[in-house]
Image (cartoon, grey):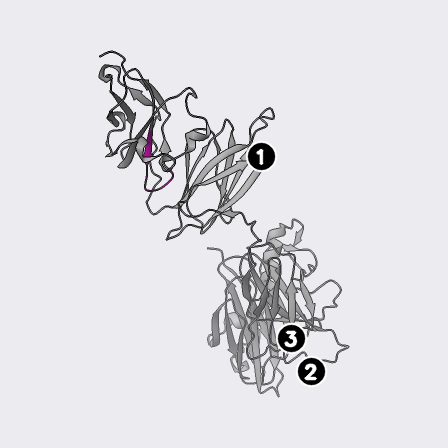
Amino acid sequence: MPVCSDRLYFTLPKKTSAFSVTVVPCDVPVEWSLMVRTAEDEPPKQQRTYKKSMPEVWWGNSRKNIKVYSNVGNAVDTYRGPAYAPASIYVVKLQSREHSTKVSVYLQEGAGLPKVFPELPPDPQVRVVGVGMSSVTLRWPSSPSVPKVHQSNTSLQYCVLVNLKHNYRGLCAALEALRRDKKIEEVKRQGATLWPTPKAWKQQLGPHRKDVVFPAPVPDGPPELPCVCQGVENTCTVSELQPDTLYYLDVFLLDSSSGSSAAYTGTSARTHQEARPTGTALRDSKPRWVALAPHGGRLLSFRPRGWPPRALLTMQVCSPHQVRVTASGQTQVLAAEIVAEEPVQIWLQGSPSYLIYLENESPATVAEEAIVKIQASSAYHRQAPVLPPLRTVKSYSKLKTCNSVTVGWHGTEERNLYCVYHQQLDSQGGPTGLEQCLGPESRSDTERAVCKYFQDLNPQEAVSTATIGGLEPGTAYLFDVYMVRRFGIAIKYHSKIVRTKKDC
């Protein structure tokens, strides 16, 4: 474990009755203590040596160490107390157990609060008074020190800093984080000033301040403060922010005459989301027909019911076209597929609302509109319903008679309702592409031959059959099978033309 430490020595004038020591850590917790040794225990002169400084020799040979105060933390800490006997030597011991850091130590002679720091109000909380898509407005109580300064004196200024990580307890910690982010290469070990004042300011350190820099790479020269607001006004509007982003905002009161600062209690705010485009709303479980011009598009929206908010999209192109479907949530694209004549299901989850964009991607030679049948339903089940592996209808020749036909089709392992419709063919022939998307609601009751529930847990053997009687001999019939589901539009199998036997 790395341990960095240092000691500071000081004495007080004879007439000093009280004093205070203030320790200001930077970016890591610091352990510090105050010890004292009175002059009565000064070692004999023959024990002195000039190889070390007088305080170090004297302290090392002392047998009585009076520990006055100790503390561990990363917040500003102050000790106040009476002075000991005249000619006493005080020692401030500093130690960091995490990594190299910087600590500022202030000594004040006399009673009362340390005068080197700008005074904070009783409630130093920064408050958010307005949030937009790219801006945040802040307000904080004014410092009692600001009205006491003449308007022409600009030594006291507020500085507002913004970052995406967290709030900072002090300005030194904020600037240390900035230095790490910028990865400064040119460093020096001695004489570096880490105090955060702009280059234009003339930093004047008082005689009772000591900066202790434990061995660490230090950038050359004072950095420029990235204040988004600076001055004596206690309001600030931070602009040019990203939408839907969490920002941490800190306010510091800086005194350029002493190089000190005081930190308000920071806050955070999330900017508003960008205005999402509004599309045509889809009604829950209601099929909708959408016409797309050549190379055109259409934006739809759907807000599912229930929790969690899941949605099931079922689509089918009812013309010889290809349509690209892109479904997105509030922040990202969730699915993108090419849809043609085969039905497609898209399972959506993770967003309270969804945008569905349909785009006609047919070749330029196709000048007709693309017709898409789409249905969005609130999915209360755990996964998308299973579609049949094949949508073909088979006719069994050996079971065909003059007045009956037996047909079969593939089902699924889920229990669904299957309805068989038939109609006698005329000279017009088979169904058109648009009719392939029509559901059983478009058929008359006289055409319905049978409806039955079916399921088989083995997909390889999930085949159902139905025998339709009452037919005319030697006549061609068109048979259609529909899978009617609880969720999603009805799935129509490919039509099958079968002619009954003429002679039996």
Q: Which amino acid type is shown beneath numbered disc 3?
A: His
Which one is nearer the viewer's eye here, 257 or 239? Answer: 239
- Is label 3 or label 2 in front? 2
Name the front one of labels 3 and 1.
1
Q: Distance of mark 3 from mark 1, alpha carbons?
A: 80 Å
Distance from label 3 to label 2 (Cα)?
23 Å
Q: Are marks 3 and 1 in contact (CB under 8 Å)?
A: no
The residue at which mark 2 appears reads as 148
Q: Amino acid at mark 2?
A: Lys
Picture quadrant of residue 83: bottom right
Q: Which residue appears at 74% of the width and 67% of the height?
A: 201
Name which residue type carries label 1. Ala
Q: Secondary structure at mark 3?
A: loop
Mark 3 and mark 2 lie on one chain; the one further toward the N terminus is 2
Res. 444 visible in picture: yes
Q: Which residues are magenta?
A: 481-489
On the image, the x and y values in percent for residue 122 come to 55, 80
How crowded is the residue under tag 1: few (<14 C-alpha within 10 Å), some, or many (20+)? some
Nearest to the observer: residue 116 or residue 269: 269
Q: Earlier in the sequence, mark 2 or mark 1?
A: 2
Q: Residue 324: where, in percent of width, then height?
A: 52, 34
Q: Residues within 10 Å of mark 2 (few under 14, many from 20)?
A: few
**Residue at numbered disc 1:** 293
Separation of residues labelled 2 and 1 (CA atoms): 72 Å
User: Vertical placement of 51 versus 300: above or below?
Assistant: below
Is 258 contained in the magenta span? Answer: no
Please state the horizontal and vertical placement of residue 478, each as a whole percent of the image. 35, 23
